[in-house]
Amino acid sequence: MNRAQTLAYQKSFREFARIDDWSARHAVTLTLRQGLMSPSRNGPSLIKLTRDAASRNYRHFLSLLSTRVLGKAAKRFGRRLNSISVIEGGSGKRLHIHAVIDCPREDLVEQFPLMIEQAWLKTQWGFGQIDVQPDTDRGWIDYISKFRDKPVYADAIDWENCHNSDCRV
């Protein structure tokens, strides 16, 4: 992708990431373990984190969190939390996920940061370095869609895990 294409892609992403009508937007940074030890016949071996494994791990996290927040409707009717995420890092920098996640239940807004932390730490690659900031705005979308720390910009946006029910693009 050339510079003009990358700028157009960033603009499209920012248009998709409209969060103004979300109930309770939370800016989230989740850090991942960079490797796991796996037992084998020849002794333990290191499994290195890949971008695909990071995306699968985030999907599992969203499933856990959605079930906790939405109850059985998450599985029975496929209801999902609104979430927009990017995966940053690589090339010597720890992979991590920046996201905005909506809490649609007013009665859970105070507990939501703790729920995020608990769900993240239940995942295989979840690392204890977690930051959750309530009541975020468009500035967070601008930050997570920056060019820095994204070796291939188009690959950084985790489209498989992005869900914006308010998107009209």
Image (cartoon, rainbow, N blue to C red):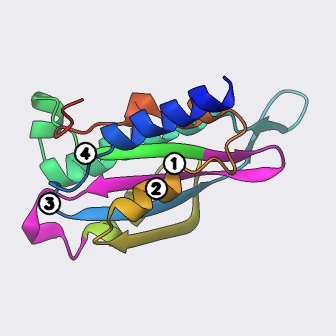
Please tell me which residue is depicted at 64% across the width and 34% down the height of the picture: 51
Q: Residue 82 carries which label?
A: 4
Residue 25 position within the rendered picture, expressed as x and y whole percent measured from the top left: 26, 62
Sooner in the amino-acid sequence: mark 4 or mark 3: 3
Q: Secondary structure under badge 2? A: helix
Q: Are marks 1 and 2 in contact (CB under 8 Å)?
A: yes
Mark 2 residue type: Asp
Q: Do the residues labelled 1 and 4 touch (CB within 8 Å)?
A: no
The quadrant where residue 138 appears: bottom left
Q: How far is the residue under mark 4 from the one under mark 3?
A: 10 Å
Q: Residue 145 carries which label?
A: 1
Instruction: Tell me which label, 2 or 3, sits earlier in the chain.
Output: 3
Task: Give the residue at x 37% y 44%.
Answer: 84
Q: Which of marks 1 and 3 is in front?
A: 1
Residue named by callout 2: 142
Quadrant into which the C terminus falls: top left
Q: Mark 3 points at which residue?
A: 23
Please name the residue shown 20% across and 64% down the image.
Answer: 24
Mark pair 2, 3: CA separation: 19 Å
Residue 39, x across and y down, in percent: 77, 36
